[in-house]
């Protein structure tokens, strides 16, 4: 389960936006700081989903089938939905876990699970199957997208402001 974050502005506004930020974009070479913040926020949202069994963002995860619920009570007593062994939850929420995908690079980031077995299981739950209802672990809303956009915007403004101060200082030192 990899989350790809994409920002865009449609149509003519997008073209104007793109032209206005072309020069700015040439100076921005590293977005790891805001991507780290976004990854932490994403993991916080997933943590809340697990803790609330899906009611943090949604109506809650559907109950387990009677047969599986009986087997789970015997084998994993007291464990909540989606947490039989705890491996999937830990891999998603602990960015230091070997199965966690927390790839933050200068111009892109990906978050999720990199273990094939856990990824398959997480995908079944996230999307549902013919025999299993959907139980969303990653439940994004428009507020998340706006918040993440603000995180990047704040970082860009801070970066531009710092660059303007350096340029101003250099002009003063050069006598111009």
Image: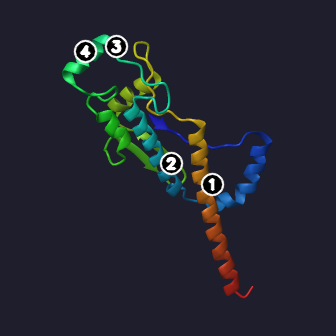
Is residue 92 or residue 142 the one in the foreground? 142
Is residue 59 or residue 13 the one in the foreground? 59
Residue at (63%, 76%) from the top-left corner? 166
In 3D space, how far apart are the residues under numbered discs 2 and 3 (Cα atoms)? 35 Å
Q: Earlier in the sequence, mark 2 or mark 4?
A: 2
Q: Name the residue under label 1.
A: 153
Q: Estimate the x, y position of residue 95 in percent, counting from the top left.
A: 37, 47
| Residue reaching furthest to the left | 74
Above or below 164: residue 61 = above
Q: Which of marks 2 and 3 is nearer the N terminus?
A: 2
Q: Mark 3 points at which residue?
A: 65
Residue at (71%, 43%) from the top-left corner? 9
Instruction: Identify the mark at residue 106; answer none if there is no mark.
Output: none
Asked if labels 3 and 4 touch by Cβ distance under 8 angstroms, the answer is no
Q: Which of marks 4 and 3 is nearer the N terminus?
A: 3
Instruction: Identify the mark at residue 38; answer none if there is no mark.
Output: 2
Q: Mark 4 points at which residue?
A: 70
In 3D space, how far apart are the residues under numbered discs 2 and 4 (Cα atoms)? 38 Å
Residue at (74%, 45%) from the top-left corner? 14
Q: How crowded is mark 1: few (under 14 residues within 10 Å), some or many (20 or more)?
A: few
Q: Quadrant of residue 164?
A: bottom right
Q: Quadrant of residue 27?
A: bottom right
Q: How crowded is mark 3: few (under 14 residues within 10 Å), some or many (20 or more)?
A: few
Q: Estimate the x, y position of residue 149 in percent, counting from the top left.
A: 61, 48
Q: Is mark 2 on a helix, strand or loop?
A: helix
């Amino acid at each position: 389960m990899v989350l790809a974050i994409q920002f865009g502005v449609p149509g003519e506004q997008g073209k104007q936006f793109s032209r206005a930020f072309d020069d700015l974009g040439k100076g921005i070479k590293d977005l790891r700081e805001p991507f780290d913040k976004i990854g932490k926020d994403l993991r916080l949202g997933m943590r809340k989903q697990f803790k609330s069994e899906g009611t943090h963002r949604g109506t809650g995860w559907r109950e387990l089938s009677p047969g599986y619920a009986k087997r789970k009570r015997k084998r994993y007593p007291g464990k909540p939905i989606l947490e039989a062994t705890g491996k999937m939850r830990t891999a998603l929420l602990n960015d230091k876990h070997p199965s966690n995908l927390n790839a933050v690079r200068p111009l892109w980031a990906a978050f999720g699970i990199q273990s094939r077995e856990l990824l398959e299981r997480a995908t079944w739950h996230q999307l549902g199957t013919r025999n299993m209802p959907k139980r969303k672990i990653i439940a994004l809303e428009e507020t998340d997208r706006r918040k993440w956009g603000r995180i990047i915007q704040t970082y860009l403004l801070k970066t531009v402001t710092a660059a303007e101060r350096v340029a101003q200082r250099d002009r003063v030192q050069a006598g111009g």
